[in-house]
Image (cartoon, helix red, strand yellow):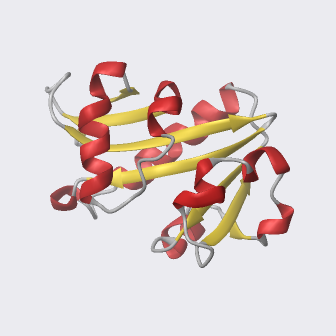
Amino acid sequence: MKRIDYVHPVKESDLPQILSLLQLVQLPIEGVPEHVGDFIQITARGKRGGPILGCVGLEIYDGSALLRSLAVEPEHQGKGYGRELTAAITEYARKRGVAVLFLLTSTAESFFAKVGFVRVERETVPAAVKRSVEFKSACPMSAVCMMKRL
């Protein structure tokens, strides 16, 4: 049975909760406020406006996008929320005309491989995406670069 009723866009008023969640799971928050309009969140069944269980965001750049900030509250990890968020943001990206998703990860390469991402060299990433704060400073050079064609 699906435990999630609400997968919906993040509102400006949700930003403090999103930033808190990202800090809790040790993900960078730089650039999030500027792109919060392209974030999606999950809240628990029956709790519209209730605590945020997870989030994921996009930074869209000329037909490509950077998937970033996939986070799930620690006590709710392993329940499929990450997969549901990834599916929702992928569909959102398609609707926005994105052809290719990119991401950087230091901890979740196997998760993203299971949902269709493949490892690529940073040199293959479009220049516009590489100008993002994630590529320029927020993520370490040791982070794995991955992509998924939509």
Please tell me which residue is depicted at 80% across the width and 58% down the height of the picture. 125
Please tell me which residue is depicted at 15% across the width and 28% down the height of the picture. 50
Query: Is residue 49 toward the left or the right of residue 22 in the image?
Result: left
Q: Quadrant of the N terminus?
A: top left
Query: Is residue 54 toward the left or the right of residue 62 in the image?
Result: left
**How many numbered markers are drawn?**
0
Please tell me which residue is depicted at 52% across the width and 75% down the height of the picture. 110
Please tell me which residue is depicted at 53% across the width and 32% down the height of the picture. 35
Provide residue 53's location: percent of width, then percent of height. 24, 44
Query: Is residue 92 toward the left or the right of residue 124 in the image?
Result: left
Please indicate, yes or no, whether residue 5 appears anywhere in the rendered image.
no
Placement of 22 over or under 110, stated as above or below: above
Provide residue 85's location: percent of width, then percent of height. 43, 44
Provide residue 31's location: percent of width, then percent of height. 51, 41
Placement of 95 over or under 82, stated as above or below: above
Placement of 87 over or under 102, stated as above or below: above
Quarter assignment of residue 10: top left
